[in-house]
């Protein structure tokens, strides 16, 4: 019996420090977290597909295709199809609070360099946001009032100014200024670049305008005599051997104009 009692005493003495240590550990542990891992299973949505749409049978391109893998097409002439998602409008851009339409037009007539060059954006769908749309730049525009006053009628030719047309032009063969508005379905051919001849830049690429078909408005750039029109990228630049410039170009060259 003394032997059994001594063994029991020894066991208690050995376990006591462990029990006391466990108690101290529990005191330092702190309360259990209120948020516990749930057993509920979540139904996550399927991973969206990132495949590009099949190439168009006619060789044209989509906006998404050009934004994703357009680098291999840089410096080539391409056709892209899409919907106009935004269009630059000078009167809207320069209007100041309290100005009437007449005030705005007077300001533009007196200083056309307040207006940026004509441009618009297109997307694969009408709701494509601007940041995912494709830039179309160097779009032909009508001569402004100052140009009409200072450039003689006989000098206002496509050979001299291939990016401009007469306001209210009646000759179908000279109607190169395209009609376009947000929501229009269009097909545009041009030079695929990272920068335009007039210094507009976009790391995702931009299209320097050459010609267009507006499906919505049933309009298409008329066939032009290649000999009368300079190559793409020469828009607004006088031909070799000439010294004539538009008033807008002269003001821009002097540092007063916009890029």
Image: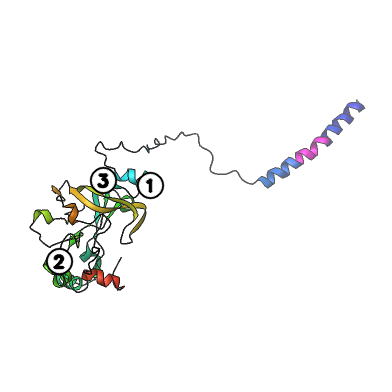
- State the image coordinates of residue 166 (x, y, percent, origin top left): 13, 62
Which mark, residue 155? 2
Mark 1 touching mark 2, by CB under 8 A?
no
Q: Is residue 17 magenta?
A: yes
| Among the two numbered marks 3 and 2 on one chain, the one whose residue lies closer to the N terminus | 3
Q: Front-most of 224 and 242?
A: 242
Which residue extends farthest front?
241
| Residue depth check, mark 1 versus mark 2: number of the one nearer the observer | 2
Q: Front-most of 67 and 95?
A: 67
Q: Secondary structure at mark 3?
A: strand
| Residue depth check, mark 3 versus mark 2: number of the one nearer the observer | 2
Q: Give the left or right position of residue 42, taking residue 105 as reference.
A: right
Mark 1 touching mark 3, by CB under 8 A?
no
Q: Quadrant of residue 198?
A: bottom left
Give the magenta part as a residue range. Answer: 14-20
Which residue extends farthest left?
170
Marks 1/3: CA distance? 15 Å
Marks 1/2: CA distance? 39 Å
Q: Secondary structure at mark 1?
A: helix
Q: Secondary structure at mark 2?
A: helix
Q: Which residue lies under the disc numbered 1?
A: 71
| Among the two numbered marks 1 and 2 on one chain, the one whose residue lies closer to the N terminus | 1
Q: Give the left or right position of residue 241, taking residue 156 as reference.
A: right
Which residue extends farthest top?
1
Marks 3/2: CA distance? 31 Å
Q: Is residue 183 visible?
A: no
- State the image coordinates of residue 243 (x, y, percent, origin top left): 23, 69
Q: Main secondary structure of the magenta part?
A: helix
| Among the two numbered marks 1 and 3 on one chain, the one whose residue lies closer to the N terminus | 1
Q: Which residue lies under the disc numbered 3?
A: 79
* Image quadrant where one finds the C terminus: bottom left
């Amino acid at each position: 019996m003394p032997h059994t009692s001594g063994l029991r005493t020894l066991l208690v003495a050995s376990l006591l420090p462990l029990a006391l240590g466990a108690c101290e550990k529990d005191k330092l542990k702190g309360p259990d977290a209120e948020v516990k891992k749930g057993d509920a299973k979540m139904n996550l949505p399927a991973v969206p597909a990132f495949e590009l749409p099949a190439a168009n049978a006619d060789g044209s391109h989509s906006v998404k295709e050009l934004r994703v893998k357009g680098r291999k097409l840089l410096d080539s002439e391409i056709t892209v199809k899409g919907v106009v998602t935004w269009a630059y409008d000078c009167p809207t851009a320069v209007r100041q609070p309290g100005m009437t339409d007449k005030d705005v037009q007077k300001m533009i007539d007196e200083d056309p360099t307040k207006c940026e060059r004509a441009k618009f954006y297109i997307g694969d769908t009408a709701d494509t946001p601007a940041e995912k749309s494709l830039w179309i730049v160097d779009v032909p525009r009508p001569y402004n009032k100052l140009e009409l006053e200072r450039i003689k009628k006989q000098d206002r030719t496509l050979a001299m100014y291939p990016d401009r047309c007469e306001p209210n032009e009646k000759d179908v063969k000279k109607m190169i200024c395209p009609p376009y508005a947000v929501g229009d379905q269009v097909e545009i051919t041009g030079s695929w670049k990272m920068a335009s001849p007039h210094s507009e830049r976009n790391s995702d690429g931009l299209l320097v305008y050459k010609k267009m078909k507006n499906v919505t408005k049933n309009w298409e750039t008329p066939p032009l005599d290649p000999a009368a029109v300079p190559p793409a990228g020469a828009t607004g630049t006088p031909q070799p051997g000439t010294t004539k410039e538009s008033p807008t170009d002269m003001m821009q060259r002097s540092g007063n104009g916009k890029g």
